[in-house]
Image: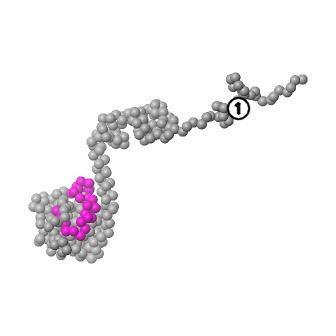
Amino acid sequence: MGPPRPSGPPARTGPGGPPRAGGFGGRPGGFRPSTPRPPPTPEQIQALAAREHVPARIAKGELEGKMKCRVWRKLHAEEARRFDQVYELMGQTPGLSLGDAFGVLQSGMTVAEFMARKERTQRKAAIKQARGEVDNAVVAEFLASLIGAKSEVSVVLAERSLLDTLVTEEPIAFTLERTGRLEKLQVVLMARRADWERLLPGLERDAKLTQKPAAVARQPDKRPYSDPRAFLDHLGDTVKLVLRNGITLKLPLMHVGRFDLLLGETGHEIFVPLHALLRFEPDTHAAAPADEA
């Protein structure tokens, strides 16, 4: 009998050489290691997305070795058509961002109409943020003191004045004892009756505004003054305010609230809502302090 045959599969041999060890590439375990590719830059992603008219995430995927942009466009034909429209609009309107281009198409507006609406929205958000940065406690305490003391107040409107007692304050309205509910936008100023009667004889007035008071815009962003922070640097200074019915006040600025100003002196405050202002400036004719005179 001859020698025993080896068991198992025959050993693999390379061309013109001895048997090789298992695995691909002559390495146990398989594949040769590859050098990792660097991550794509935002500029590369944006350039590919713009060229192929695809979302940035798809362009990023192709650059990372995943699904190609042309494959995504075939699989998502309807969405790809929207991206074609968006990039066409961006080409027609220099400076238009991808997000704004989508907004224009979805809204059905022209580019000018959409951008005007966006600007209004941003202004409203900025005003809301500005108001939130101002402490309203002092103004709220002043109104609460009028209510608690049941003080008789003079409420000046655009074309007339009321003598009444403040009962409650709501976010957009006052309730007066005899007059009832009064929208805050109608109020030009408010003060205790005695303080207003003492101040009234010496007031300056703009004749044109006295005859035809300026209207108040419903939208805060369309009013001359809605950001209370503009007044903070003038606390303690004498300021000149021209109100929408022509009344001109020249008084020290005591406190700034989110929606209103307090002028005058402690115990003799004049309450002026920001919506009633047409013009504001420091009073350059006010007397200088003793150490500067």
Look at 34% across and 40% down and name the residue there: 101
Q: Which residue is mark 1?
A: 21
* Residue 188 visible in the snapshot: yes
Most distant residue in the left direction = 207
Q: Nearer the viewer, residue 264 or 33?
A: 33
Q: Would residue 205 be found to the left or right of residue 9 on screen?
A: left
Tell me if residue 24 comes above or below residue 212 in the rendering. above
Q: Nearer the viewer, residue 162 or 189?
A: 189
- Could you say where residue 106 lies in the image, as x and y percent from the top left? 35, 40
Quarter of the image holding residue 5? top right
Look at 42% across and 35% down and name the residue there: 48
Most distant residue in the right direction = 1
- Could you say where residue 152 lies in the image, as x and y percent from the top left? 21, 74
Q: Quadrant of the C terminus?
A: bottom left
Quarter of the image holding residue 181? bottom left
Most distant residue in the front direction = 17
